[in-house]
Image: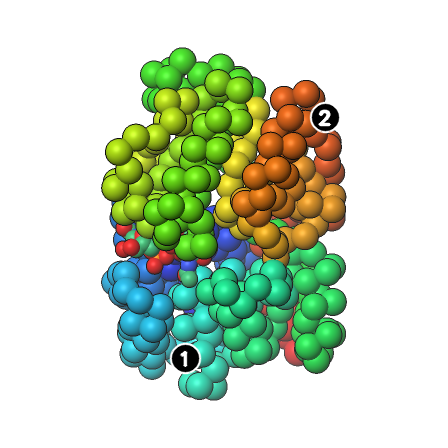
Amino acid sequence: MMKVTLIAGARPNFMKIGPIVHAIENAKASNKSIDYRLVHTGQHYDEKLSNSFFKDLNIPEPHVNLGVGSGSHAVQTANIMIKFEEELASNPCDFVLVVGDVNSTVACALVAKKMNTKVIHVEAGLRSYDMRMPEEINRIATDALADVFFTTTPEAGYNLIEKGCNKSNIYFVGNTMIDSLVSNLGNLVKPALFDDQALSETDYLVMTLHRPSNVDEQSKLAKIINLIGEKCNGKKVIFPVHPRTKQILDQFSSIPENIYCTEPLGYLEFMYLVKNSFAVITDSGGIQEETTYLGIPCITLRENTERPETTTLGTNELLGFNVEAISNAFSRLFNGEWKRGSIPGLWDGKAAERIVRALIAMNTH
Ligand code: UD1
């Protein structure tokens, strides 16, 4: 019996791990020799950033929650390592599977490797080449440790090969975050604010901001919010505010009238808003992918992206915080001149199935 410990810690992990849990359960139901243990590190702990995703995505309760909570990067990463070392010692497994690029990803990969347990990285090989991003450091360190690499794009595979990874350990399988989207498109839920704010389809924008480089400095965040408020042609901008951003936003005396701030939304409500929006403004990684899949124009307030196919194939444009470029982008958007985009290969809702099939095949060697 192959035992895989799955790690989830922070919001973007849950959409990536859910489909893998479901694919393993399906494999078990057809008598395949594989089982899993789901470990939640507790990096995200708010109902809105964690539990609601388990409910929305039908992910079973984790077998254990390490309850690490917040802290500086060193404190958070170290706490995850201390707790996960005990967890893995009590519950050994064949593979530890980590997803994405958050602190839980790198912390658990490092612990597993030092305990001679093989590490699988899902969403391996992405690179923004921006070492000021904590996630880039986490990606590089995790890929340096991993034994098996599942990638979302061919380019991610080339990045790994360039760093000396053995080709035979790299599997291009597609995108498990898009699996979650594909399987939930029929279940999206209209949030109460849709009617309360008198929104109508394709007549409002959605904004999310949580990157430290955009939100941690009050003056930068104020500039961004004022510019977006001004450029949106009076259209409403729905802004679900991440707790990190809220800490700074709470100090503002006013924000533009057409920007409506709300708590973070659950997955099904958030994706409903995105799917029906005119356009999205973000600095998230995952939302660049989700908008590309949905064909919704995406204005990304970052200078680089680890997901370049969303700009080359998809509907995404990187604008950093260049006022002229942003103004120009909004003119094109409101003049109906935004590119149409296409969906990257294998973003078809079946990535987790491919991952589990590959794992089962490894077991027989
Ligand atoms: C983390 C990930 C980031 C991911 C983001 C999505 C890392 C390095 N960063 O960033 O890649 O895109 O999650 O949300 O792992 N907080 C709460 N409630 C929670 C969680 C956090 O109030 O449930 C507060 C914390 O106290 C802290 C702030 O939010 O003040 C930031 O949380 P943290 O987990 O450190 O990083 P994120 O910015 O959420």
Asked whether 81 or 118 is in front, the reply is 81
- Mark seen at residue 337: 2
Classify residue 357 by image quadrant.
bottom right
Residue that label 1 marks: 111
Report x, y in % for residue 289: 60, 45
Report x, y in % for residue 15: 48, 48
Classify residue 148 by image quadrant.
bottom right
Q: Residues within 10 Å of mark 2 (few under 14, many from 20)?
A: few
Q: In the image, is residue 118 above or below residue 254?
A: below
**Point 51% across, 70% down: residue:** 137
- Amino acid type of disc 1? Val
Q: In the image, is residue 304 above or below residue 161?
A: above
Report x, y in % for residue 89: 33, 81
Q: Mark 2 and mark 1 in contact (Cβ < 8 Å)?
A: no
- Amino acid type of disc 2? Glu
Q: In the image, is residue 238 above or below residue 319?
A: above
